Image (cartoon, helix red, strand yellow):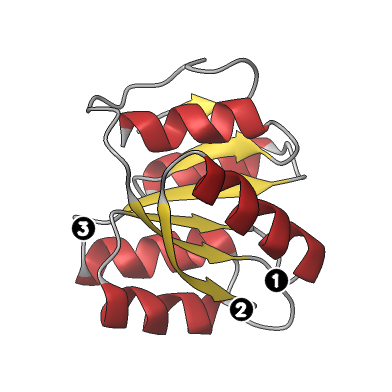
Amino acid sequence: MGNLRGSPGYGSQMQGTSEPKRVVVADNDAEWRELLRTDLSLEGHQVVAVCASGEEALDACREHRPDVLVVDERMPPGLNGVEVARRLRETDPGIQVVVFTNFDEEEIIKGAADAGAVFVLKGNLRALRAALTLA
């Protein structure tokens, strides 16, 4: 998939339409969960579940069958975002995963790409919106 590390569309290989998406958000930080819920809703997307862990994200994806999962990379003590993306790819490859994280590390970027996910740096809401628009 792609890497939206910098500006919107940077390194993206995704193709799609700009139709509203059904989204699950997973982040262990309550403030980020609320920010993402608010921002994505204002962009016209339907946030169908908000989760605090990777395990909850997988359960929510099984239950709600979203178009996109936006998942933080580090959510101790459970699964990280790349592992969630790997597992989801095995069980439901139709769900696009965006790994949305503060950690700009090559290992995470490569892990996300290997799992078929898109990497977006946390704080770059414009790149996150672009990833959902293209999913």
- Asked if the residues shown at circle 2 and circle 1 are in contact, with their CB atoms under 8 angstroms apart, the answer is yes
**Image position of 120 with respect to 78: above or below:** above
Give me the C-alpha separation between circle 1 and circle 3. Answer: 22 Å
Kindly state the secondary structure of the residue where label 1 is placed.
loop
Quickly name the residue at label 2: 53
Q: Residue at x 74, y 77 (%)?
A: 76
Q: Name the residue under label 1.
A: 75
Which mark sits nearer the N-terminus, 1 or 3?
Answer: 1
What residue is drawn where x is 51% and y is 50%?
41
Question: Eyeballing the image, is 105 above or below 95?
Answer: above
Q: Say which mark, if any, is on residue 93.
A: 3
Image quadrant where residue 125 sits: top right
Query: Which amino acid type corresponds to the residue marked 3 in the rendered image?
Result: Pro
Q: Residue at x 41, y 48 (%)?
A: 45
Q: Please tell me which of labels 2 and 1 falls first in the chain.
A: 2
Q: Residue 35 location in percent, x, y?
A: 71, 53
Q: Position of residue 97 (x, y in %)?
A: 40, 51
Q: Residues within 10 Å of mark 3 (few under 14, many from 20)?
A: some
Name the residue rendered at 54%, 38% in the picture: 119
